[in-house]
Amino acid sequence: MSLPIRAFIRSFSSGSIQRSAIKNVTIIGGGLMGAGIAQVAASTGHNVVLVDQTKDILKKSHSSIEKSLQRVVKKQYAEDPKAGEAFMAKVLSQLCTETDPAAAVKSSDLVIEAIVENLEVKKKLFASLDKAAPKHTIFASNTSSIPIKEIAVATKRMDKFGGLHYFNPVPVMKLLEVIRIPETSDDTFNKLLAFGKAMGKVTVNCKDTPGFIVNRLLVPYMMEAVRMVERGEATPQDVDTAMKLGAGYPMGPFELTDYVGLDTCKFIIDGWHAKYPNNPLFDPSPLLNKYVAEGKLGNKVGEGFYKAKK
Ligand SMILES: CCCCCCCCCCCCC[C@H](O)CC(=O)SCCNC(=O)CCNC(=O)[C@H](O)C(C)(C)COP(=O)(O)OP(=O)(O)OC[C@H]1O[C@@H](n2cnc3c(N)ncnc32)[C@H](O)[C@@H]1OP(=O)(O)O
Ligand SMILES: NC(=O)c1ccc[n+]([C@@H]2O[C@H](COP(=O)([O-])OP(=O)(O)OC[C@H]3O[C@@H](n4cnc5c(N)ncnc54)[C@H](O)[C@@H]3O)[C@@H](O)[C@H]2O)c1
């Protein structure tokens, strides 16, 4: 028996991975997060359909999944490369792509949305999915900053709606925030928790409060970092070095912004500023806005606060 399978069975019996009623999963959005979620869902035995707007985007998603899987397999199957190849082939056989969201949800138990961080775009998508998906299908959003309820109102299945907030990179980060709104039924919430555990994640429960747990703390920290640079108190490089070596963070705030995507960061902060205009924590950052206007969106385009490593 190969090492990862043994580890999987061990975690099953120790209760850290649970069986879940959810087998068929549709992920909408094949960018940084959607591709990572699709990879991990397929790696943990789910049938996955990944949806994006064009075949070209989906080609890129597929190739990033293959690259990431290779990293996982190289490490987990170091002593048995043949079993690694078989694992990779199995995972990829459980993953297909689709450009029509309505067709993709036809036999889905769970839909996870990971598209652009924009309320109106997310609502429009869920309103159309609500008409196309079977009655039993659960809907979840991976939004970083939008209240789940504001998205869920676009559907007539608020009892089957919740938040699944993953962390980037999904194959590496162990945490999953599972969010319920007052309308989420116990059955839906329990299924979401069990699904998260079946994906091998450590779940934390959270009410539908702005930023849930992690981003409620992370966003003010990152905004203060960019304001220090705007005030001329330190360079991005020195802030990053300080937070890595002085606070033990794996990445400094500017490296993390490049990793997350400056466009996504701007969507988050602009959304919170519009909602809480009197809270100076969420005032826009001229420096972030300048980089986004210049198209420097971070690692995904090769440059953000730093030039991405090839
Ligand atoms: C300052 C401007 C302010 C702007 C405004 C801010 C607004 C607010 C923004 C908030 C954003 C919120 C976004 C979201 O909602 C929430 C998030 O996701 S927050 C992000 C959380 N993630 C992190 O904090 C990541 C921190 N970084 C790390 O943990 C590590 O650096 C890393 C990414 C894991 C990489 O590690 P390194 O050691 O540097 O590099 P390696 O390449 O050696 O990798 C280590 C290890 O991991 C494996 N690995 C890495 N990436 C992948 C992958 N994609 N797939 C598979 N495996 C991967 C790699 O193989 C290594 O394995 P090993 O060999 O060590 O066994
Ligand atoms: N980047 C992060 O670190 C991170 C972490 C956690 C949560 N999130 C959240 O996840 C979501 C996605 O973020 P991302 O970083 O993956 O963004 P991304 O820009 O990398 O990818 C978004 C993808 O969605 C696709 N898309 C947009 N509208 C669509 C539609 N109507 N139908 C189908 N596909 C559509 C785009 O083509 C793109 O490929 C956002 O809500 C974001 O806040 C991001």
Image: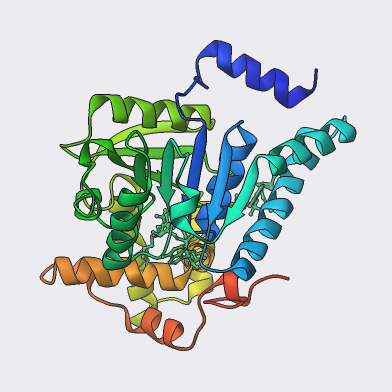
Q: Which residue is drawn at 53% across and 65% down?
A: 255
In this orientation, which residue lies closer to the viewer: 255 or 228? 255
In this orientation, which residue lies closer to the viewer: 44 or 281? 44
- Residue 169 visible here: no
**Quarter location, residue 10:** top right
Q: Residue at x 58, y 37 (%)?
A: 47
Residue, far top: 13
Looking at the image, residue 155 lies above or below residue 188:
below
Where does the image place residue 179, in percent across and percent down from the top left? 29, 39
Q: How many labels does the image show?
A: 0
Q: In this view, does 251 lie to the left or right of 288?
A: right
Q: In this view, does 255 lie to the left or right of 268?
A: right
The colouring scheme, among rainbow, by chain, secondary structure or one colour, is: rainbow
- Residue 2 visible here: yes
In this orientation, which residue lies closer to the viewer: 2 or 123? 123
Q: Quadrant of the N terminus?
A: top right
Q: Which residue is drawn at 82% across and 34% down?
A: 86
Where does the image place residue 12, in percent across and percent down from the top left? 57, 16
Looking at the image, residue 17 lies above or below residue 308:
above
Where does the image place residue 253, in percent across and percent down from the top left? 45, 63
In this orientation, which residue lies closer to the viewer: 286 or 127? 127
Q: Is residue 210 left or right of residue 25?
A: left
Q: In which quarter of the image is the C terminus?
A: bottom right
Looking at the image, residue 239 lies above or below residue 179:
below
Where does the image place residue 125, in percent across and percent down from the top left? 34, 60
**Quarter location, residue 289:** bottom left
